[in-house]
């Protein structure tokens, strides 16, 4: 009597079972129960390299079977949608192969470790789209209800002309110099450090919220702790290894055709800040402010009203009319970070069923990648301004 | 390859599929995926009176089958645990029957509409416990990680001798006098209004956090809007009907053997407050403060330190060592209101597997009921102090 | 070239030079410089019992001379306004004598230690008013700009029908049981403890903001620490003495003719709360919230607007059009606690010059006193409801 | 009986009577009453160009006399200290002349409109210091108690090695493009716009709090509204005039010898932000955060403690042991923005009496000026990094 028998289903296969994989599994399990979806996702298969570990994860997370080779996963008849949750160095290869095999693809952010990879992925996505195969990049924070509501306010003109986007993403897990050298601190695996991991979210959100592309950047990056302990090393290997990515990055951006100014900062060294993605947008008619550590809240200032009662209004984004809230609880019952993945899964399935291309597209992911690459180029050239190439140029 | 084949399972049947039923279903679906449980819950059956509606809900929520008679549900061989999510007037009958049938019972709060019902339920639970059958009342807010952490701080002596418990639960959904007369506003269904619905949580939390029972109360209740529109009425029936429960209640309590003072306020008329359960406990060595609208945060003041750096510390309760957090995401990734039900489900299953009586017990629920009844008695007698009977007296 | 030569002046004499005296001195010094007053206050004389101490205080605070007998102060020709900042047991005698001598009087709150004293003072004030002599009680928090703005919103109907007034005043300076026995802890000097000191403010503000009188109360009081060290004791005197006032009080009130509910709590044992006067008023159309520790901020919820952008707006009460702000700094430059006394001084002087009776009057102070006495009576009779006598009954 | 007769006095003359002049007057009036000063400031003379206006201001603010020529003010025998509150284009001329005349000087920030002027002023100050004449630049925010406390924590090593200084100063008074063209928007009077007015504070505070100098910067500036209405124009003059200063600036900085990163943003276009000077400093052992709109609060995170109770502690900086608090009210009674000027006046008088050079010195002001000039130079050269010259290079 499950939904699978009643309406058409879509088989999902995930590659990767760590933090992101677990979050996606929770979403595939939850989305069809909270939202009325036209296709019922079936949790077909989980893929990872370590056979015992992937088997245990599949059992824990509720997947029907486990695979150890992503090529096999892609080839399965019961998998119509491939969800890529690996480190960034594998995104391009897996996603392109899956699209070529006629499978829809959801790919975690950042889309790739280099613009070249992202360009190849985007080209593959565009070819696939011509055949009705859909692709999406996992900028899940667009689907925080408060941020979707913020976008609605901007789109409705409530902020007027945008003057400032101010964005910071502050974490502190590298503050201690004894923290070990993980894959996230190696350029060959992660592409970059805080810039790609955290900055990618900020760049996507800045463009999404403002409705404008970033056209040029000036920035710099820093690595505070250059060597970190290596864990699980073999006898004779050195005790520490070099950190080859940035610990922090600061950059300034121009948005769109006008004079809007973006300021961005990302770091893993802000002691006491755990997951502080903070956004503020100031326009000629109003402002919005947001903090991911309080993700059910949106602050909105309407600059057009009576100044004696004006100020930032703390909107608890839990009303039935707020984006995505129809699927959840009554007003005031706050949501957690994980709902962003359920919303993403739901929107993707709805787009697939409707034969529409979901957003953010691989092209959107590529554009973010180009901004990040421009920041790195600027950082390497004394913070000079770098124009971000766009599809048109 | 699901857990059901690997480790023992326990079949769950829920009675009720509205707001609370949906929250419980989400928990039964989620708990075994996020926590390592000794028994795997199987979502066996959902029960409701409207056949079409319960069938649709069962499909949506993921139940294996639907029932329309709770007696049938209880009798099913594949149901070992009955989860009661009905309005309060049915709690006693269903729970007692389920326990008599040898089924474990989870019963939503408040335990019953009257102390007499709660006493009968408690007696049934105690008889059942002798046979290894477990029961638990659903005061889910004990399992907000921040409140479980607060309890740990109190139990560790970090607050010293408790002087004040200050608790308010503010909602606003009745502010508009055109809001219709639902079952929650009828004494015959709901037992009481804000007092039972919201006050039950406060009383349980005050006793849980302080580790002390409420021994006496003085209080009053108010109904601001006496008549409300009746929806779905038959021809000839009046357009409005009487609200027979309280809209708001205020009461003062003595806790334990000492001089600790509790102050409590509940209302559904606090315009702008959606789900503002606010708690503060002040002791001789420190204080804690909490707001359910920011449920990942606990404020803790250590009064024993240097006054120049003292104050309320905003603890983001998302660290691996915080209660229940091992099952979730990395630091800073906040949780939603629904996790309380997953924690409740997990703890109940662990207790059943361990052959232990879970908390809060029906006896705890009865004690809350006695406090609420004492408040009503005080309200009916000019706010005079009423001693709360305990098991011992 | 000071203002004294240009426009008429009014000589001020203050009785008391401790905390309150210093705050009043600051106000008399500041008010004529920040506000355009019709009479220029001249700081004529300061009075205290300890000759050396009062002389030093007068020099420090900027008074032209020092007196040690309040009768002498009253008799001075250069004093037209007597400002009473003594402990409560002296209020009645000094204020009545000053009024009889034809001097305007500003008297600190609470107006007196007993309703009987307050009645005598009110009668004296009414007699004096017939001769153009003005009197005012120092409920300075009415003149916090944010609270004056809150009153304006209520008076303008922005909150609709008032349902709840929720007020707490939390301090922590008695948390440590080694804190000594000061005059504030002795009933013969202070009248009561937290109830009179802190509760008087709450009662006045509840009535001021709502525009309704408290008609009945039910309450209780507590003394957590019964004995405290005596300082400066003579040989042979005991080391500790009894605390004869309340440490904390909780009470519920009915306001006005309708069903509005007031809940009140005051304590000196809320570890970590230094001066947390918190107010919330909920009406049918909106709510306001305030915390004295953030006194430049008012939170206002408009319940009549679009629920998708509704919530509590943090108004920074520093705009030129906000109450009292014309005298101060540009927007965003926050004010301190002391401005309330400058506003009080300014309003009093303006009323005197205009031949008008200022508010809050001694009659207002008496009404607060009656409420506090009713709370004590209720506390002494098992929290039964006590009707508050009014001028009319 | 005023202090003037008892202890030595020091005559003060202020040049400028608008916003800053009024704030300084309040400080000169208040400081000797709240703090025990070795010299009693006497408010000797106020100077401004408009005779009637300066006379009215002097009367209102309490100055003994009014002057219309600053040269005359400097020459007065009863003026030993000249306090310069004019627009920036007059700072150098007045301050240098006053120092040459043997008068102590307090000069508002920014010290000058150009580094060249600031260098001349610094040289003059150093010559004067050799003769016991003191000078100070008015970076009053160093004397916000919360920021002085923050500095104490950094100096005590509580933050460890500094990694980040994050500073923004957000205002919104130019949001409306109809706001007129005032002197603050003209380069010839103000030197720069938000950069000098707001950025000067941030730069000084970043260096003060971290204890490190800014060694290099990369930045950019923006003018959103290029033409604004001219008020008080003669017949035939154009209705609008060009804004010749920046509306907003963003810059990145390196601090000290290490890798500490500073990020800075200033704007007058952040709708809804009135005076939001926000600072955060992250170190290896802890962090501090501050917002001028809540100036009595300091947030401090101790990263060295138990992570389960760690977080940002909201310190209410009103304890007797906090910087400057001995002069004010009991704990919890918050201070206003104006106290910074009283603290500045007190510290200056104490330094003069002690024969010590007060801080921040003109050399400190010059260093800030050099940073701001470097930002402008960077902005003019494509945001390339500009090394900030120091006294040593």
Image: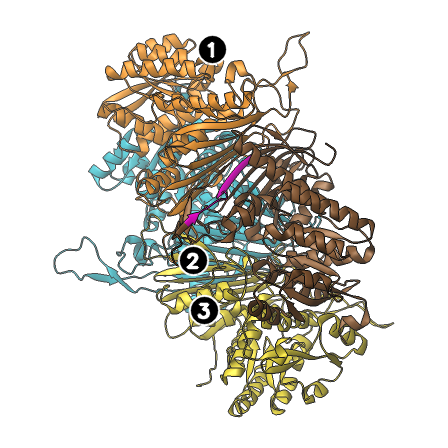
Chain colours: A yellow, B brown, C orange, D cyan
Q: Quadrant of residue A164?
A: bottom left
In front of the other: A109 or B27: B27
Name the residue carrying label 1. C51
| Tally of numbered tags | 3
Q: In this view, which residue lies farthest toward the front?
A: B236
**Left or right: where does residue A352 sit relative to residue D42?**
right
Residue A351, above or below B163: below
Q: Alpha-carbon distance for marks 2 and 3? A: 46 Å
Q: Secondary structure at mark 3?
A: helix
Residue D177, above or below D40: below
Q: Residues within 10 Å of mark 2 (few under 14, many from 20)?
A: few
**Does any portion of residue C267 appear in the rendered image?**
yes
- Give the chain letter at badge 3: A
Q: Alpha-carbon distance for marks 1 and 3? A: 69 Å
Marks 1/3 same chain = no
Q: Alpha-carbon distance for marks 1 and 2? A: 81 Å
Marks 1/2 same chain = no
Q: Residues within 10 Å of mark 1 (few under 14, many from 20)?
A: some
**What residue is at 50 percent from the left and 44 percent from the top?**
B245
User: Closer to the observer: label 1 or label 3?
Assistant: 3
| Residue C96 percent coordinates (x, y) | 36, 12
Q: Secondary structure at mark 2?
A: loop
Marks 2/3 same chain = no
| Residue C366 percent coordinates (x, y) | 39, 21
**Is residue B243 within the magenta segment?**
yes
The residue stretch that appears in magenta: B241-251
Name the residue carrying label 3. A209
Q: Secondary structure at mark 1?
A: helix
């Amino acid at each position: 009597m499950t939904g699978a028998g009643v309406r058409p289903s879509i088989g999902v296969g995930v590659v990767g079972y760590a933090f992101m994989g677990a979050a996606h599994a929770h979403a595939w399990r939850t989305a069809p129960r909270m939202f009325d979806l036209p296709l019922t996702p079936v949790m077909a298969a989980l893929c990872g390299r370590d056979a015992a570990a992937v088997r245990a994860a599949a059992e824990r997370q509720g997947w029907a079977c486990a695979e150890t080779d992503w090529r096999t996963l892609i080839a399965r008849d019961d998998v119509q949608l491939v969800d890529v949750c690996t480190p960034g160095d594998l995104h391009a290869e897996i996603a392109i192969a899956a699209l070529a095999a006629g499978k829809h693809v959801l790919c975690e952010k950042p889309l790739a470790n280099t613009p070249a990879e992202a360009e190849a992925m985007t080209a593959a996505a565009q070819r696939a789209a011509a055949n009705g195969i859909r692709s999406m990049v996992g900028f899940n924070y667009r689907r925080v209800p408060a941020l979707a509501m913020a976008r609605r306010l901007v789109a409705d003109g409530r902020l007027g002309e945008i003057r400032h986007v101010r964005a910071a993403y502050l974490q502190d897990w590298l503050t201690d110099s004894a923290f070990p050298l993980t894959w996230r601190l190696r350029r060959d695996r992660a592409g970059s450090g805080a810039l790609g991991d955290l900055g990618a979210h900020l760049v996507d959100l800045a463009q999404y919220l403002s409705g404008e592309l970033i056209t040029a950047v000036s920035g710099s990056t820093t690595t505070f702790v250059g060597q970190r302990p290596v864990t699980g090393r073999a006898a004779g290997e050195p005790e520490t290894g070099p950190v080859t990515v940035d610990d922090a990055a600061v950059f300034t951006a121009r948005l769109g055709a006008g004079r809007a100014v973006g300021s961005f900062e990302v770091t893993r060294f802000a002691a006491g800040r755990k997951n502080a993605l903070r956004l503020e947008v100031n326009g000629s008619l109003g402002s919005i402010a947001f903090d991911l550590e309080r993700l059910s809240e949106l602050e909105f200032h309407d600059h057009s009203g009576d100044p004696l009662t004006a100020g930032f209004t703390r909107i608890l984004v839990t009303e039935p009319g707020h984006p995505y809230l129809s699927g959840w609880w009554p007003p005031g019952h706050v949501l957690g970070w994980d709902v962003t993945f359920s919303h993403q899964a739901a929107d993707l399935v709805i787009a697939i069923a409707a034969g529409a291309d979901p957003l953010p597209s691989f092209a959107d992911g590529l554009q973010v990648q180009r901004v990040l690459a421009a920041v790195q180029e600027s950082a390497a050239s004394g913070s000079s301004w770098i124009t971000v190439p766009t599809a048109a140029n």
